[in-house]
Image (cartoon, rainbow, N blue to C red):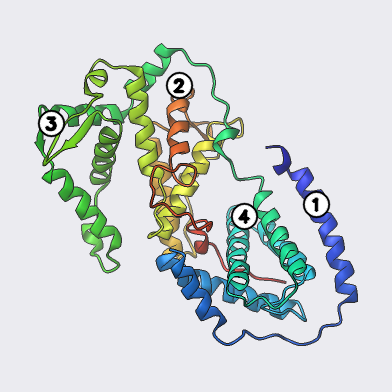
Amino acid sequence: MGSKGPASRGQKRAAKTKARQRRQQSSTGSHLPTFPAGVLEDFGAWLTDRDLGRHAERVVGLVRTTLTQIDRANPGFSVTSWTPNDAHFIVDAVERIEDSDEENGAAAATNIVVTLLEFLTFLDETDRWTGTDEDFSHCMEDLTDFIDSDPDVLDPEDVELPEIAIEAESAALLALPLVVGVDALVERVGAGIPVAGVEELSTALDDHDHDADHDHDHDPSPADLASLDQWAAAIASDVLQVEGTDVVPGPSADSYRSRSVDTLREVLTQHIRHQLSLSEEDVSMALSNSFAIQTLLAAMTEDLPLDNPEEDYDGLEGEDLRTAQLIDYRVRALQEQGVLVRVDDSLEVPPALRRAVLAGVERAEPFGDWDDDGDEDGIEDGDDAAPPPVFA
């Protein structure tokens, strides 16, 4: 990934660490700053206005915890007037957090930096920043560099597709449970059926997702979720379409029945896109989708992701536990769909399916623009589920 490699990142960090140490030696600040009246409350309102919705409160809570830890460990820190020394201190601290836990450290570090970037932006846009323009630019650049130089984050362009014979791709697509499911839907629809049944399933699942007090004894089954995903893939790929009050065969129905590889590929692409598009209203689901996207991308490279079938959730509770369970569910679902297969102790996307899968990832949020209502605020959904920071 070129500039994102660990060597260049390490050199940059080493230089900034030395600069931080020089500034620390000349620092004479001795007061312990406090939060200006109303600043965090106003920050929460600002986040909500930027469509961060229900997880604005969690972002504020994380920023409060982070700034309190910085205040205790870095004498002279001012909440509204950071210095380059403060930024270097923060980057050094989050790098220690990143290195402290192989599984969760990177998520926690990214979480901290992204929320602090939002807080700095808030200070600037609301005229709460009391430092110099030069210091603001320096702090923003340092924190942004940390995010941009993360060597573990993959983009679709990092995947090189292999040359696959059309016959091999066709056979791999036809072997998918997805095709069996869409075949059943095409047969069920026939010349047309009322759309009400599909709408009822979708509405029930949507109501469940937005009801915090729902009865877990009546959670949707994996079969319900799979059925909805298959309906979505069939309609998005034009194999089926909604016409008035009915679901009827779509423009691609005939090519699907004739097993056109282009149409079969599009069905899988839309299946991936639908499953992995982010939801700004459910932080844990969005984080699980982001994790699945990174898993799929890594599973199409030489550095395959490890499979962890027996994840240990000891110590997790509440939303953190739900996030971990959703991540596990999403990865297991992709395996059941045949999109991810186990190779030794790793996971791989079969080479014959990679063209369709990569296209699905590219169209999904955050890479795609299929959903005009997607989250465009710059915050990585679900980051607030990472562990709180602890600065030494």
Please, what is the three-letter code of the amino acid marked with disc 3?
Arg
Q: On screen, 62 above or below 321? A: below
Q: Where's the N terminus, which quadrant?
A: top right
Element at badge 3? helix
Q: On screen, 184 above or below 31? A: above
Please, what is the three-letter code of the amino acid marked with disc 4?
Ala
Q: On screen, 318 above or below 338? A: below
Q: Position of residue 216 (x, y in %)?
A: 26, 61
The residue where tag 1 is placed is: 12
- The nearer-to-camera label among 2 and 1 is 1
Mark 2 and mark 3: Cα distance apart in space: 29 Å
Q: Sequence-wise, which precedes: disc 2 or disc 1?
A: 1
Mark 2 and mark 1: Cα distance apart in space: 40 Å
User: Residue at the location (20% across, 54% down)?
Assistant: 204
Q: Residues within 10 Å of mark 3 (few under 14, many from 20)?
A: few
Q: Nearer the viewer, residue 135 or 54?
A: 135
User: Residue at the location (26% across, 18% down)?
Assistant: 255
Q: Nearer the viewer, residue 356 or 335?
A: 356
Q: Residues within 10 Å of mark 2 (few under 14, many from 20)?
A: many
Residue 270: quadrant of the picture: top left
Q: Sequence-wise, which precedes: disc 3 or disc 1?
A: 1
Residue 352's tag is 2
Q: Is residue 91 left or right of residue 309?
A: right
Mark 2 and mark 4: Cα distance apart in space: 32 Å
Mark 1 and mark 4: Cα distance apart in space: 18 Å
- Tell whether label 4 touches label 1 (CB within 8 Å): no
Residue 341 appears in the picture as rendered: no
- Tell whether label 1 touches label 3 (CB within 8 Å): no
Q: Nearer the viewer, residue 170 or 87?
A: 87
Q: Sequence-wise, which precedes: disc 2 or disc 4?
A: 4
Q: Sequence-wise, which precedes: disc 1 or disc 4?
A: 1
The residue where tag 3 is placed is: 188
